[in-house]
Image (cartoon, helix red, strand yellow):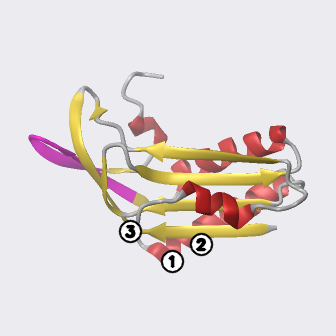
Amino acid sequence: MRTFYQITDAALDPEALREAISDPVAGAIATFVGITRNSFAGKPVEHLEYEAYAPMAEQEMEKIGMEIAGLWPAVTGVAIAHRIGRVEVGEASVAVAISAPHRREAIAACAHGIDRLKATLPVWKKEVFADGSEWRENREEEDLDDGR
C-alpha cells in the first residue's frame, strides 16, 4: 500500500496527494479537502492558526492509515496532510486521499479517514475573529455551528 502522511506549514496540494497514492490497479481515488470557512458560531473568522507536534501527529496519521488498510483490504493508497501555522479563509487546512480498485471502498475509507482524523489527531486550532481569538481542539463537534 502506498502512503503519504504530512504535517506542513506550506499550502496543501491535493493533486500531490493523489499522485502519491496513484496505482495502476486503482480505478478510484476519493479525496476530501477541508477548507477554512469565514464564520464560526455566527462570528466572522479572519483566519485560523494551527499547532501540532508533527512527529506525534504524523504517527497518528499512520495509525489511521493502518486502520483503513485493516477495514478495507482492497485500498491501495492512503494520503493524509494537515496544515499548521496561519491558514486564510478559502485555503485548505486538511486533505485525505484514498485509492482503491472501486469507488465504494475509496469513498467509504476516505470518509472514515477524515472522521478518525478529526477525532484523534493532536492538532489545535485558534480561530481569529475581528474582536479576539479562541483556541480549541480541532474536533468535529466544535466545528459544527449549525447543529448538524
Q: Secondary structure at mark 3?
A: loop
The residue lying toward the viewer, choosing from 40 and 95, is 95
| Vertical order, 62 against 15 (above or below) | below
> Magenta segment: does it hold 126?
yes
Q: Are marks 1 and 2 in contact (CB under 8 Å)?
A: yes
Magenta-colored segment: predominant secondary structure: strand
Of label 3 and label 2, which has the lower sequence position?
3
Quadrant placement of the N terminus: bottom right
Q: Are marks 1 and 3 in contact (CB under 8 Å)?
A: no
Q: Give the residue pinned by disc 1.
A: 55
Graded by Cα atoms within 10 Å as few (under 14), some (14 to 19) or many (20 or more), the crowding at tag 2 reads: some
Left or right: 13 in relation to 28: left
The residue lying toward the viewer, choosing from 141 and 37, is 37
Query: Percent from the top left, x then y, of residue 33?
Result: 53, 46
> Magenta segment: does it hold 19?
no
Q: Quadrant of residue 139?
A: top left
Q: Give the residue pinned by disc 2.
A: 59
Instruction: Name the amino acid type tagged 3.
Output: Asp
Q: Which residues are magenta?
A: 124-135
Q: Give the residue pinned by disc 3.
A: 9
Q: CA distance from mark 1 to mark 3?
A: 14 Å
Residue lying at the far left of the rendered structure: 131
